Amino acid sequence: MMLRRVKIIAASCVLSLGGMGSALAGQTYTKNADFDWGQLKGVDHAPPNDDQLQITLGDNPIPPPFMWVANFADGTVTKISTDTGGQVAKYHSVLMRNWDGSVPQGITLPIPGADCNSPSRTTVDGDDNAFVANRGFCTDSTTYTRATVTKFAGSLGYCVDRNGNGLIDTSRDVNGDGVIGREPPEFLGQADECILWTRNYAEKGDLGRSVAIDGDQNIWLGGYSSSKLWKLDGKTGALLQTIDLNAEKGTIANIYGLAVGPEGFIYTSDLTAKRLRKIDPKAPVGRRVVAEVGVSTPTYGLAVDRDGVAWLGSWADESPGRGGVLRVDFKTGKEEKILVSSSTDCTGLTRGVAVAGNGDIWVACYSTHKLLHFRRSRVTGSVFFNKSYATDSGTLGVTIDDHQRIWTSNYDTNSVTRVDPGAGRVQLSRPAGGIPYSYWDMSGYQYRNSTIRQGEWVVVQEGERLGAQWGTIHWNRESAGSVPAETAIEVSVQASDDSRALSSQPVFPVTRGVSFTGAGVTGRYLRVRAVLRTKNLTQSPVLSDLSIIPSWSWGESPAFMCEGTVDGTPPPHVQPCAIPQVGIIARWQGVHCRWLYENRSRIQSGNRDVERHRSSIHRQAAPYGDLAQ
Ligand SMILES: [Ca+2]
Ligand SMILES: [Ca+2]
């Protein structure tokens, strides 16, 4: 459960006086103590970079505390809490009819145990939303299915109240047993308002076995036999680009695994032709496959580290010999097999691969039902086998959570297993919710490790009135703020009169310095989320300051305000003091007066005025008795 500290803009009630308006200050966050009012996740104000926020570019990415497991036979995707291992939601892996009225082609209503859509690879974007690629596995003439991709809202704010009942109708664990049932109210099927859309990309018979997100939060999908790549808009699913890799290169390969690494390069693994590719999607047509490496073994799972080196599962049975992980460096064009110590650890058939923030490699070994740990030397950079962990049987996929714990999905036993590398032990196994066939980036960790780095800051602001229309958010007005090339700062808000309902309100993207009054974002409470993101893995943008400027604070000049209780009754009231209001003030007790007004011209005139104004608040605070002088 997220802790929210609420910063109050002004006293909770305003007595408006004719001519003066109810002028109240905005709120500026600029010092360490200001930012600490909010929740910092993957950002810091560590010295010497105080009084600003930057991405913590250390070892450890912090994905959302969930993993998304595709259950191929049931046609569902389970969302599992990585805190508890319990299922928190389950969704159909396709929408038969999109909410915009469009109808995806070549899909079937999921049937438990006999689904044709056959969802497998999942991944998570920088806003915590998830995607699943459906392979489209049935190829006979009557029930043929086509590859599709479906987007799921990762939080209630991205779900949409389609039926207008004022609630987000969605799957959840109503009875709290850690398992999602097959019927409402725990499972809503097609009516679930957190399934956002399903889109086609590949042609009939061209299986969709891969999905990855790029640094701009768009999605890349591969066609297995065509070896084509499609880029879809991550928000809408609209087609943005197509690349025919075989035509580009003049060779024949398939796309099995897919990953986007540093600098936006795309990598593919290949189960059949054993050709691995590195692609620059921005290069001119005909020059997009920038490297191709033929390897000695069929490759399965694929993960790319922060140096752009590919790590792959080897789909070969080495029994009675030893299996391991394949390292492929596209700069040298060389492959290297790093083997386990003994055949007890693994005899081959390695599938999912994940690279940890510290550079270690984690691999699912299907033949021995084990999770393999390969350690990377901090000194030499070389990688060597460390140890194996016995998981539930059928170890297929591997992903890493926000506490740097390692999870496997286990095909044979319909389960997920968590390993704590710090303690060096298996912690728990829990039901996966179907037959899991997920081996790619189930938590979004890989995305946040080697495609981008990001962090976020969330603060809840309380206004002084119900139904507040809010106004403008401004940031980086101080010179310390910066958004270098390849980086971004994105701010969004949710508003509600009920602070407990904030998280289920629609997420509204804010443009810097542009008023959103009248945009339908209303409520006494405003939840502000600032995301700092970079495609350059070694450079962060800087959020030096952020101001929430309610439209009701706008005016031409500052006003001297008093606050206190009326007739001893809380909450405190705020009122302009410039005009004597004897009848009211006489009844106030404990009245303090101060400048509480931040006008538009000052806000926009730069940091110096804001700072002067802020200090004046404190300097001029005085008891009511002083005001009388
Ligand atoms: Ca609804
Ligand atoms: Ca349940």
Image (cartoon, helix red, strand yellow):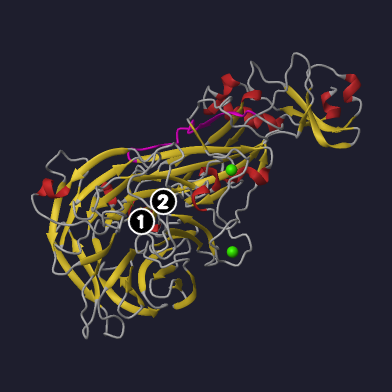
Cα distance, mark 2 to mark 1?
Answer: 8 Å
Left or right side of 502 for 276: left
**Residue 570 location, quadrant:** top right
Q: Where is residue 455 in the image (x, y as percent from the top left)?
A: 46, 49
Mark 2 residue element = loop
Is residue 321 or residue 456 the one in the foreground? 321
Q: Name the residue under label 1.
A: 117
Where, quadrant-wise, is the N terminus in this rendering?
Answer: bottom right
The amino acid marked with disc number 2 is Val
Residue drawn 45% across the image and 68% down it: 405
Residue 521 lies, with reference to residue 313, above or below; the image says above
Q: Specify whether 19 is left or right of 73.
A: right
Mark 1 closeness class: few <14, some 14–19, many ≥20 residues within 10 Å: many
Residue 23, given in percent of the width and then of the height, sits at 70, 23
> Which residue range is magenta in the image?
469-486
User: Where does the image place residue 336, in percent across and percent down from the top left?
Assistant: 18, 69
* Mark 2 burial class by Cα count in 10 Å: few <14, some 14-19, many 20+: many
Is the residue under label 1 in contact with that under label 2 (CB below 8 Å)?
Answer: yes
- Quadrant of the rendering where the C terminus is positioned: top right
Q: Which residue is drawn at 65% across and 47% down?
A: 5
